[in-house]
Amino acid sequence: MDGRRRNPYELTDETPVYVISVAAQLSGLHPQTLRQYDRLGLVSPDRTAGRGRRYSARDIDLLRQVQQLSQDEGINLAGIKRIIELENQVAALQSRVAELTAAVEGAAVAMRQREAQVHASYRRDLVPYQDVQQAGALVVWRPPKRGEHT
């Protein structure tokens, strides 16, 4: 969640609302196939207090993806599980990269603001600026010897 409070009645793709019979119908699979996928860890729906499975729209999409990889691509269930794990890992890493990119951009903005504050705080009345290339003389300062006053 992103820190904002959500309406508890708001349905999202992650909301577990479908019982196994409806999920099977929506995915085009047999309920026993869904149970098997759950046992193998391919698609793990949420559970009710009575241990009944509740599938979300995201789970239904994942069931369809598993079926497509199995039937159309000929990938075995162990391979599909690994594909799903790697896709989840990639998604998590992409999210982390986005977080870090935002943090770096924020730090860069803060640094530029602080740098502007520092430059604005310089006391220009104490040190008159003179372009070195235009100045025709070189001045060498030597401290007075002890006992000498200027």
Image (spheres, helix red, strand yellow):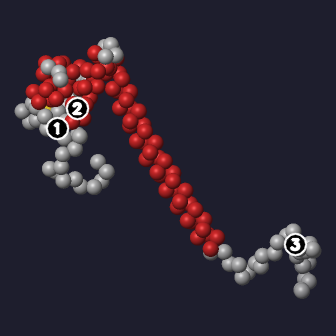
Which residue type does callout 3 highlight?
Answer: Gln
Residue 17: percent from left, percent from top: 14, 38
Indicate which disc residue 59 carries.
2
Numbered badge on residue 134: 3
Q: Tell me if residue 19 comes above or below residue 2 in the rendering.
A: above
Q: Is residue 108 above or below residue 79?
A: below
Q: Do residues under tags 2 and 1 come within 8 Å of each other at their CB atoms?
A: yes
- Count of all numbered marks drawn on residues in the image: 3
Q: Earlier in the sequence, mark 3 or mark 1?
A: 1
Q: Residue at x 13, y 34 (%)?
A: 18
Identify the mark at residue 92; answer none if there is no mark: none
The residue indicated by pointer 1 is 16
At label 2, counting other C-alpha atoms closer than 10 Å, the crowd grade (few under 14, some 14-19, many 20 or more) is many
Which residue appears at 34% of the width and 27% of the height?
Answer: 85
For label 3, the SS is loop
Picture quadrant where residue 50 is located: top left
Left/right of residue 78 with respect to residue 30 in the rendered view: right
The residue at 49%/48% (across/down) is 101
Name the N-terminal-most of marks 2 and 3: 2
- Tell me, yes or no, whether the two marked residues, 3 and 1, touch with CB atoms within 8 Å: no
**Mark-to-mark CA distance, 3 and 1:** 75 Å
